[in-house]
């Protein structure tokens, strides 16, 4: 596929919380309309489908939502878990988030047939498609809770590192960012998603806790995560808020983090 065939990734980049707050103020009416659009799509059935276009398959499809795992309001209405739903009907049945990671990697982070790709963290639905698009792929899954992250790779080994929904379990995260920067080639970049508190200036870190007490997450990320990336030596770091009804990227404040060295 040539670069011209990749649809534009529908996002707005924020370098810090102030830019995000200003954006929200400016487009609040549009954000309210998006919420109403999403609410009108939700059905109380076990599953429903939303028509749209898959940015990876480049064709019209029905994005499938299985509501059985969703939380319910007291009146029984489901609370949409949009980011993990909206599966394409392609072989990999990629969800909203999985498609967005691959789409962003291609359209913004420059993933292409000559890229040396690092996939960090446990296997994710996006990994197969990312590896198909890359030149070479290295998967590094393991990290020890409470231990500084050490990536088993030489300096400058990769053009792109991708970490989907796992870095919040990697303390200390600021040191981990420096380690990712070390293994990236000049011009390379780190792309990640993680649970993000969009209204929090500061991350909540539980780094001091014993590994046994860390349970779910070592960090609940806030906007200072972008400062940590810059402090780790990345020249540019931004949170990209993305949304598209047509491409099946629904949900409030989906964020893709991208840092370039
Ligand atoms: Zn698809």
Image: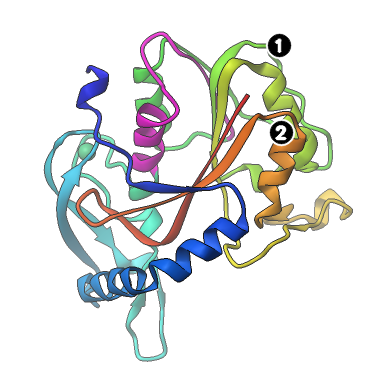
Label 2, label 1: how many angstroms apart (C-alpha)? Answer: 14 Å
Looking at the image, residue 218 sits to the left or right of residue 92; the answer is right
**For marks 2 and 1 on the same chain, the one whose residue lies earlier in the sequence:** 1
In the image, which disc is placed on residue 155?
Answer: 1
SS for tag 2? helix
Q: Quadrant of the C terminus?
A: top right
View extreme (left): residue: 60
Q: Which residue is mark 2?
A: 177
**Camera-nearest residue between 184 and 41:** 184
* Span colored in magenta: 98-121
Q: Position of residue 75 (x, y in %)?
A: 35, 91
> Are the residues at dot 2 and dot 1 in contact (C-beta closer than 8 Å)?
no
Q: Residue furthest bottom?
A: 75
**Residue at the location (77% across, 36% down)?**
231
Q: Is mark 2 within 8 Å of ligand 1?
A: no
203 lies left or right of 196: right
Q: Position of residue 243 (x, y in %)?
A: 34, 54
> What residue lies at 37% left-to-right and 16% top-to-bottom?
112
Residue 22 rendering spot, x and y as whole percentages: 52, 64
- Position of residue 110 relative to residue 74, above or below, is above
The residue that appears at 56% across and 43% down in the rendered structure is 238
User: What residue sits 35% from the left and 19% below the top?
Assistant: 133
Query: Which sits in the foreground, 129 or 53?
Result: 53
Q: Position of residue 19 (x, y in %)?
A: 55, 56
Say which of 45 and 9 sits in front: 9
Residue 37 shown in magenta: no
Q: How many marks?
A: 2
Secondary structure type for disc 1: loop
Say whether mark 1 is within 8 Å of ligand 1: no
Rendered-image quadrant of the N terminus: top left
């Amino acid at each position: 596929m040539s670069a011209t065939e990749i649809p534009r990734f529908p996002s707005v980049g924020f370098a810090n919380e102030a830019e995000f707050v200003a954006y929200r103020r400016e487009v609040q009416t549009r954000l309210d309309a998006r919420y109403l659009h999403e609410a009108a799509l939700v059905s109380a059935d076990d599953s429903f489908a939303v028509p749209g276009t898959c940015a990876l398959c480049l064709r019209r499809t029905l994005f499938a939502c299985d509501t059985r795992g969703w939380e319910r309001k007291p009146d029984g209405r489901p609370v949409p878990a949009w980011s993990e739903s909206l599966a394409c009907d392609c072989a990999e049945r990629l969800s909203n988030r999985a498609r967005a990671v691959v789409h962003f990697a291609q359209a913004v982070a420059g993933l292409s047939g000559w890229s040396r790709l690092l996939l960090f963290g446990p296997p994710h639905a996006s990994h197969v498609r990312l590896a198909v698009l890359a030149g070479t792929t290295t998967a590094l899954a393991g990290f020890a809770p409470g231990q500084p992250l050490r990536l088993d790779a030489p300096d400058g080994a990769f053009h792109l590192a991708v970490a989907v929904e796992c870095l919040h379990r990697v303390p200390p995260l600021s040191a981990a960012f420096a380690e990712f920067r070390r293994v990236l080639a000049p011009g390379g970049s780190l792309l990640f998603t993680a649970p993000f508190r969009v209204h929090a200036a500061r991350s909540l870190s539980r780094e001091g806790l014993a590994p046994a007490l860390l349970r779910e997450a070592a960090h609940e990320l806030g906007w200072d995560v972008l400062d940590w990336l810059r402090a780790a030596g990345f020249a540019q770091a931004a949170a990209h808020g993305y949304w598209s009804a047509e491409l099946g990227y629904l949900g409030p404040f989906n964020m893709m983090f991208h840092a370039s060295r």
